[in-house]
Image (spheres, rainbow, N blue to C red):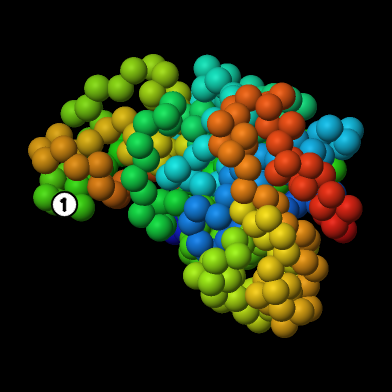
């Protein structure tokens, strides 16, 4: 239920941006590295939003899966998670703090650990529509 | 897109104050110079606080070189529990949070923005609950970790560590200047690895109108006993730290 903490951040953010308006829709990106359990995250988000007084029947909540894209800062090679092998324990560690991928993965081409997570890190608010 | 990554709208930043709301005193242990003993001082302070029956946590924000699990002899087989966030394991009556749980002792080379991501993530997901004190061990320097703490943890009141060496004193003067400019109150300056109070350190405290917390002797037993808590508590360094506890309470 670490997803609950992530959902809390989103709800605090919504409270800040919605203000006196009426929330119509929220689109959230879920990065592959954080491997958020969508069902658990949705449950946490709806529970927290209900507690904040949102009319959930009037809010469209959608999620977009963001595949991870990594790029080596040394040789420029770009790759996805499917090119590397990670154990369940390693995936779980990355789930909690995505940057620890640098402890378990190196560039498949040159072996450098100095790479950038270009896309697909974690929870990302893509769009909020308020009326 | 209206919110992502390290932008000002980062949802995690909104959670930090909430996560620390039930902590009475947040004390980052800071020094721009490496090797002045921040980690051991942080450890001794946390042990002394726990010994005095106050609730205490320690957060290791030396992200690329975490060591608190070593000084407290905490097995990395321990894992934070997951419950609406992560609950830090407790050892020697100290709640301990560290990136080392997730790196398992492997090297973690990170750039500045990545370190900021880690700090925000850990601050946002860690559920400390009620604490009298949270001690934060910080890396040397004055960069991402320190700025992130000073920007986002409003109740943070740093404790500064120096040695009597002129290079350390000069570095600390820079840090104190920055803290003064930002109007951030400090607990005081602790003189580590020193048999007796040094004029240069005391004068620095006078210059910045801050508390001189005392001197902590260089103690070979402390080095030999790293990770051995009964030995750590028998050191002269520990005895010196016990004497500064009165300064810690806000």
Quadrant location of the N terminus of chain B in the rendered image: bottom left
Relative to residue B233, is residue B179 drawn left or right?
left
Relative to residue A62, is residue B202 drawn left or right?
right
Q: Residue at x 62, y 48 (%)?
A: B218
Q: Quadrant of residue A41?
A: top right
**Is residue A41 visible in the rendered structure shown here?**
no
Q: Residue at x 16, y 52 (%)?
A: A74
Instruction: Please tell me whether residue B189 is drawn above or below residue A101 in the rendered image.
Output: below
**Mark 1 surroundings: few (<14), some (14-19) or many (≥20) residues within 10 A:** few
Q: Residue furthest front?
A: B195
Instruction: Please tell me whether residue B189 is drawn above or below residue B45 in the rendered image.
Output: below
Q: Position of residue A91 (x, y in %)?
A: 39, 24
Residue annotated with mark 1 = A74
| Chain where mark 1 sits | A
Nearer to the camera, B20 or B195? B195
Q: Quadrant of residue A18?
A: bottom right
């Amino acid at each position: 239920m670490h997803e609950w903490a992530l959902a809390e951040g989103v709800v605090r953010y919504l409270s800040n941006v919605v203000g006196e308006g009426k929330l119509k829709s929220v689109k959230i990106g879920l990065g592959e590295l954080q491997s958020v359990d969508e069902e658990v995250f949705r449950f946490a988000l709806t529970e927290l939003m209900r507690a904040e007084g949102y009319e959930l029947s009037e809010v469209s909540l959608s999620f977009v899966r963001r595949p991870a894209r990594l790029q080596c800062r040394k040789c420029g090679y770009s790759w996805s998670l499917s090119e590397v092998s990670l154990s369940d324990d390693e995936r779980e560690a990355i789930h909690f703090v995505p940057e620890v991928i640098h402890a378990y993965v190196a560039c498949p081409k040159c072996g450098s650990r100095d790479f950038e997570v270009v896309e697909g890190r974690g929870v990302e608010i893509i769009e909020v529509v308020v009326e | 897109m209206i919110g992502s990554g390290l932008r000002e709208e980062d949802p995690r930043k909104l959670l930090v104050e909430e996560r620390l709301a039930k902590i009475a005193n947040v004390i980052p242990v800071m020094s721009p110079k490496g090797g002045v003993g921040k980690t051991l001082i942080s450890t001794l302070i946390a042990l002394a606080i726990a010994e005095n029956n106050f609730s205490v946590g320690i957060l290791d924000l030396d992200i690329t070189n975490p060591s608190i699990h070593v000084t407290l002899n905490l097995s990395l087989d321990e894992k934070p529990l997951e419950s609406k966030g992560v609950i830090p394991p407790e050892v020697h009556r100290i709640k301990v949070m560290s990136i080392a749980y997730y790196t398992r002792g492997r090297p973690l080379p990170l750039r500045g923005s990545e370190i900021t991501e880690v700090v925000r993530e850990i601050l946002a997901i860690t559920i400390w609950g009620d604490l009298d004190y949270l001690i934060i061990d910080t890396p040397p320097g004055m960069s991402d970790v320190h700025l992130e703490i000073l920007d986002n943890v409003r109740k943070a009141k740093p404790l500064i560590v120096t040695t009597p060496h002129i290079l350390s004193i000069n570095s600390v003067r820079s840090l104190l200047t920055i803290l003064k400019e930002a109007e951030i109150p400090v607990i005081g300056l602790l003189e580590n690895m020193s048999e007796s109070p040094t004029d240069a350190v005391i004068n620095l405290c006078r210059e910045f109108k801050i508390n001189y917390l005392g001197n902590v002797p260089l103690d070979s037993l402390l080095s030999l006993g790293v990770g051995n808590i009964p030995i750590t508590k028998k050191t002269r360094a520990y005895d010196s730290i016990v004497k500064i506890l009165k300064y810690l309470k806000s």
